[in-house]
Image (cartoon, helix red, strand yellow):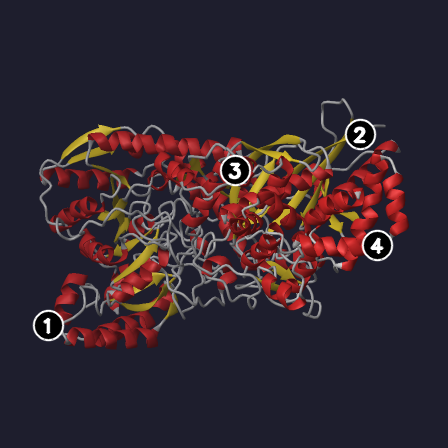
Amino acid sequence: MFEQSISALAQQLRNKDISSVELTRHFLDRITKLDPQLNSYITVTEQLALSQAEAADNLLKNGKGTSLTGIPIAHKDLFCTEGTLTTCGSKMLNNFIPPYESTVTSRIQQAGAVMLGKTNMDEFAMGSSNENSFYGAVKNPWNVNTVPGGSSGGSAAAIAAGLAVAATGTDTGGSIRQPASFCGITGLKPTYGRVSRFGMIAYASSLDQGGPMAKSAEDCAHLMQAMAGFDEKDSTSAENPNDDYLTNINAPLTGLKIGLPKEYFGDGLDSKVADVIMAAVKEFEKLGATIKEISLPNLQLSIPSYYVIAPSEASSNLSRFDGVRFGHRCDDPKDLLDMYMRSRAEGFGSEVQKRIMVGTYALSEGYYDAYYLKAQKIRRLIKEDFVKALSEVDVIMGPVAPTTAFDLGSKTSDPVAMYLEDIYTLSVNLAGIPAMSVPAGFVDGMPVGLQVMGDYFAEAKLLNVAHQYQQHTDWHLQSPTMAKGA
Amino acid sequence: MNWEVVIGLEIHTQLTTKSKLFSGAAVGFGAEPNTQTTLVDLGMPGALPVFNKEALRMAVMFGHAINAEIGMTSVFARKNYFYPDLPKGYQTSQMDHPIVGIGHLDVTLEDGTTSRIGITRAHLEEDAGKSLHEDFQGMTGIDLNRSSTPLLEIVSEPDIRSAKEAVAYVKMIHSIVTYLGICDGNMAEGSMRCDVNISLRPKGQTEYGTRTEIKNVNSFRFIEKAIYTEIERQADILEDGGRIIQETRLYDPEKNETRSMRSKEDANDYRYFPCPDLLPIVLTQDYVDEIKATLPELPSQKAARFENEYKLSEYDAHVLSSTRPMADYFESANTIVKDAKLTANWVMGELSKLLNQEQLEIENSPVNAQAFGELLVRIKDNTINGKTAKDVFQAMWEGEGSADDIIESKGLKQVTDTGAIETMIQTILDANAAQVEQYRAAEEDKQKKMIGFFVGQVMKASQGKANPGVVNPILVKMLKG
């Protein structure tokens, strides 16, 4: 049951072959059995899930509901959920129960989905390995000695291990796509502004974007139907109407123009990963696509640009965690400054502290022009690269990450190596375009994701491209051994 | 040494929007702590600001009123610093691209001199909450009702050269924002707060001296006193050969002194950067023009019209137009009186005197414009004279009724019947034969002085009711014999 798609499960729920309560119990049982090995959930909301499942069954009984009604899914623990602990992977919010609901989770809830719980993540979404969580590292279900990727590592691992049908994630520099690649699932980072950020705890506001993570592109489309769209509570939310993400998902790919940026296939890319990507590209050729080599000349600059802009915004966004109104407050502060300093030193982990300091420095008087302003200029160049390339091709393809999942602990002492993990994903966030990770094969038993990037608001196109590929391949249907064991 | 004082002002005006600058919470003064807040004002995780377009309209109105460039693209920036009543750890303000750019105001002083004060900019920003240090046993209470309340910060050029000019400028701003209806102008409740930058330089020197900033002065009187005090303090230091430290100071009205709050060295690096949660505000020319077309009459325009239409002096026109309620009071009273000079004198004289005595605003006057006008009509039609009118006005003020009621019930109607007055005069001349003799013997110019005695006697005999305009010519004629 855990390997089935949203469409298949929705059909069975509608036919009364199964009930949502049964389905929900099935996943809750799997979480109980398997998650101790993976640590993909921070909070499991068993009671809430069962009551939501019951409500869903009642709706379905009356022939109501959507394709998500009764489907058990999980939310990354940075979406605020009313009445449910929302930690953002941080000790700072170890006690934080929001009195409000994020737009994303609210819309998914209104579509009738069941929330199994809140998934683990790198603290405040800062990390590429999910090792920066106050609640402990998440393990990759394909090999528990490796990382699941980050920061949405909990969501990716949970889906791969069959501990949720689908999940939400957020992507600031690759945080949906890279864990999707490492865990062999499908993930979409929508266009900046397509999915509301209201109630999403901010890391870097101009880059953060919520999106779906699931087994398949079609499942992602089902989630997008519910979560995407204008929200008056988010001023950066795009006002143009949503596409229907399912209508054209079966359109043939004949004549599709695919751009392969040469910078995505240079030094640093594992050759076996490159082989997997090229094999996938060949598959698209078989489906009628044409291939064109293109160039995104400023790719290398995306790392320094990102690691100035994101920490700068983070240094300001995280100022509200001051121990005054909510979250962690140190014991017996002797004065205001002591309260601020100890509350924040105790509440934030080292990666978060590091990025706050980097961002504070970059925005300081006398450094602003040299760092922040320059980074913004590079950002414009990167955006122009994509706009130019996408005027010549329909989609751009390349790897999501230079390697498959690496061993736990192998890069924690080398932040630059860790930051280089994001080389193929960061530029997409800087440009604001949508991109997906689609399972495309394995290297030494570990999954490899193909990255598909598209023009602004071309989510429907990306889902169509990925879905057609998945109609002709079965990489996305593979499950790790541990998932089958339970 | 002869010092020249250089003053620049930053005025924070709280805009009269219904809801806050970035949230739907109500704006209001005096509510229970933390009852006028939303997730946004509380700085909750994941909360996002949504810009209040009403505040934008108000800022553009102000821009037009000071003949300023309107920022067709303005950008909100974050000003980062930690303080318990600043819930997000930053204030959303405008830095490089304010909504209102360079403009100016012409300020008229009491002596009639006018000077042009440059306005560098005016920008929108959100207010912080309040820290409450009393009643919490050594702890601090935080009230976030004021958090995210919209402010328009108006920054002047250092063009002001005296305390009087500073006050005149602030009054002018006060008058403009209240005319526009974008600020209630209530300084006691903090709707308008002033930061005063002051430096001294030897007369004739072109470069500025080191300045200090006096924060949060919130009355016209305190602005003037704080400036005098600070000028004196700086002059004393400079004359003793000392140096002024650039710092922020607080004015203590009780001790009439300024005290150091923090020096420049302790100042925060605010790490301004464009707020990524808000898009730049891009205006169309149509929008800007439409606001300009619907602007109400401004104080300077009204003053010019008063001079023109009512033939008032420049000074009178300026005073009467200084606040919208006063201008409205004057105009509606005068529609009844139809004698602008008389109405103007009474509004600026008796009415203002009683209002000042009781510290009342004109809109709270116990005598409304209609009743006031009816009183003046009785002066105009000679029912009562000016002196009696003052008594009637006092009685009206105390709630004794309308002018006519009081005149009637107290029998104050002026005697204008020439026969009755002649009889009265004859009686007085008979009783004061010696003075009549002296008068008749005197030179003409002496006579003019002596006639006052007889007028006094007549008024006394008539209990003030004799019309002096009627009394005088008859008296002169009868004295001639």
Frontmost residue, A473 versus B282? B282
Label 4, label 3: how far apart the Cα atoms are:
50 Å
Q: Rounded to the nearest whole Å, what is the CA distance between mark 3 and mark 2?
A: 43 Å
Q: How many marks?
A: 4
Query: Visible in this render: residue A444?
Result: no
- In whole angstroms, how far apart are the C-alphas of marks 4 and 1? 124 Å
Q: Nearer the viewer, mark 4 or mark 2?
A: 4
**Mark 1 and mark 2: Cα distance apart in space:** 92 Å
| Residue that label 3 marks | B309
What amino acid type should be assigned to the residue bearing mark 4? Asp
Specify the label residue B430 is tagged with: 4
Circles 4 and 3: CB distance less than 8 Å?
Answer: no
Expressed as whole percent of the image width and height from the top left, the position of residue A130 reads 41, 54
Which labelled disc corresponds to residue B3? 2
Q: Position of residue A113 (x, y in %)?
A: 25, 67
Identify the residue under disc 1: A15
Give the distance between the C-alpha atoms of the residues marked 3 and 1, in whole angstroms. Answer: 85 Å
The residue tagged with tag 4: helix, strand or loop?
Answer: helix
Chain identity of mark 3: B
Q: Callout 2, which amino acid?
A: Trp
The earlier-in-sequence mark between 4 and 2 is 2
